[in-house]
Amino acid sequence: MELRPQILAQQAAQGDKESFGALYTLYYRELYAYALFVLGSVPLAQDAVQEAALAAYRSIGSLRDPAAFKQWLLRILANTCRSGLREKIRAREESGAQTFDEFPDDAADFTLSAELRQALEALDSQEREILLLRVFGGYKSHEIASVLGCPAATVRSNQKRALAKLHDILTD
């Protein structure tokens, strides 16, 4: 594990604004990618990351383990995305719009095929979150467990089940 983020997190927890900014800069792209995959909308993803960063900044003093800053921040973002997703589903039901917005050309790194997006939509929210964190975020099962607040074994079994569902959906 890199020591620099841990030191920055310690300094941020002690009120150093520049250290928090450096951490945000370090993790922004990863946070944005996660939010974009979960929410399927560039504006919603940007809002979610901004909201999560603000919430983290406000509560950085409560961070107990500076080495776990990234998982702590991701947990805040995951909760923010869940709230945003509920709002998006409500709005979609009212308007009849599609779940995923079109991605702009400059977001090509984050674009998923329409088939994969639809297949991900067919999963339940926890299965989708686990796959997004594992496959697109590169997190290990114990890190995902920390973010979701469940045992690592549950993450692994849900991941296996979600991958089987995706396989079935995409091969039909």
Image (cartoon, helix red, strand yellow):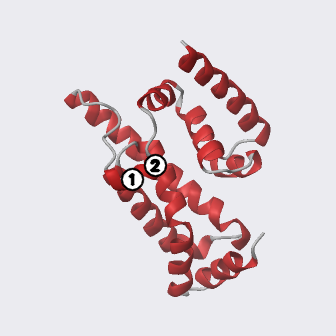
Q: Position of residue 48 (x, y in %)?
A: 40, 56
**Disc 2 and disc 1: Cα gap in Å?**
6 Å
Quarter of the figure that contains the C terminus: top right
Q: Position of residue 80 (x, y in %)?
A: 45, 52
Tag 2 near tag 1, CB within 8 Å:
yes
User: Is residue 82 something that shows in the picture?
Assistant: no
Image point (58%, 42%), residue name: 132
Identify the secondary structure beneath mark 1. Answer: helix
**Which numbered disc covers residue 167?**
none
Q: Position of residue 94 (x, y in %)?
A: 22, 30
Image quarter of residue 30: bottom right
For the residue pair 127 and 119, the one nearer the viewer reads as 119
Quarter of the figure that contains the N terminus: bottom right
User: Is residue 170 something that shows in the picture?
Assistant: yes
Is 51 on the left-hand or right-hand side of 148? left
Image point (63%, 27%), residue name: 162
**Residue named by callout 1:** 107
Q: Amino acid at mark 2?
A: Phe
How crowded is the residue under tag 1: few (<14 C-alpha within 10 Å), some, or many (20+)? few
Identify the secondary structure beneath mark 2. Answer: helix
**Residue named by callout 2:** 110
Image quarter of residue 93: top left
Image quarter of residue 39: top left
Query: Is residue 134 shown above or below 25?
Result: above
Q: Amino acid at mark 1?
A: Ala
Image point (51%, 58%), residue name: 31
